Amino acid sequence: MLPFILAVLAGFATPFVEPALTKLVQPRLSDVPVHEGEYLTITFVLLLIAVAILSIVSGVLASAFNVLLGGALGLFGVRLFNVLKALVDGQNIDRDDG
């Protein structure tokens, strides 16, 4: 259960950690062509690797499925919650709130 909770937290923290990690990683990847949108993916993957390492160090068995599911729920959970809330409230979810 610990890896799942850590993965949810890592997924939720990804958009907040991404700017700092981009500043750290960007100079080191100067020879590799990386688009701006890919830094979010790199951050997400690095945070999930950190979750796996923390799980191994703590002695807890970390299933890859649990880590990926927790990370996805953390990353997209707020958006999914807003969509479900809009569906329940009967609002139009086709518009882009930006």
Image: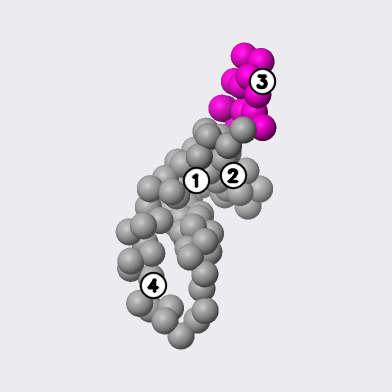
Q: Amino acid at mark 2?
A: Ala
- At label 4, which amino acid type do we have? Gln
Find out whether the residues at labels 2 and 1 contact each other: C-beta distance under 8 Å. yes
Amino acid found under the numbered disc labelled 1: Gly
Q: Which residue is mark 1?
A: 11
State yes or no: residue 30 in magenta.
no
Do we see residue 2 in this rendering? no
User: Secondary structure beneath disc 3?
Assistant: helix
Percent from the top left, x then y, of residue 43? 46, 59
Q: What residue does disc 3 label?
A: 87
What residue appears at the point 43 percent right and 48 percent down from the top-left corner?
A: 15
Which residue shows up at 49% across the image and 57% down it?
40
Q: Nearer the viewer, residue 22 or 50?
A: 22
* Image quarter in which the N terminus is found: top right
Residue 30 image offset from top left, x and y in percent: 42, 81
Q: Nearer the viewer, residue 56 or 80?
A: 80
Residue corresponding to mark 4: 26
Mark 2 or mark 4: whose residue is earlier in sequence: 4
Nearest to the eye among marks 3 and 2: give it: 3
Is 87 placed left or right of 17 in the picture? right
Q: Kindly check if marks 4 and 3 are in contact, taking CB atoms under 8 A apart as contact.
A: no
The residue under label 3 is which amino acid type? Answer: Leu
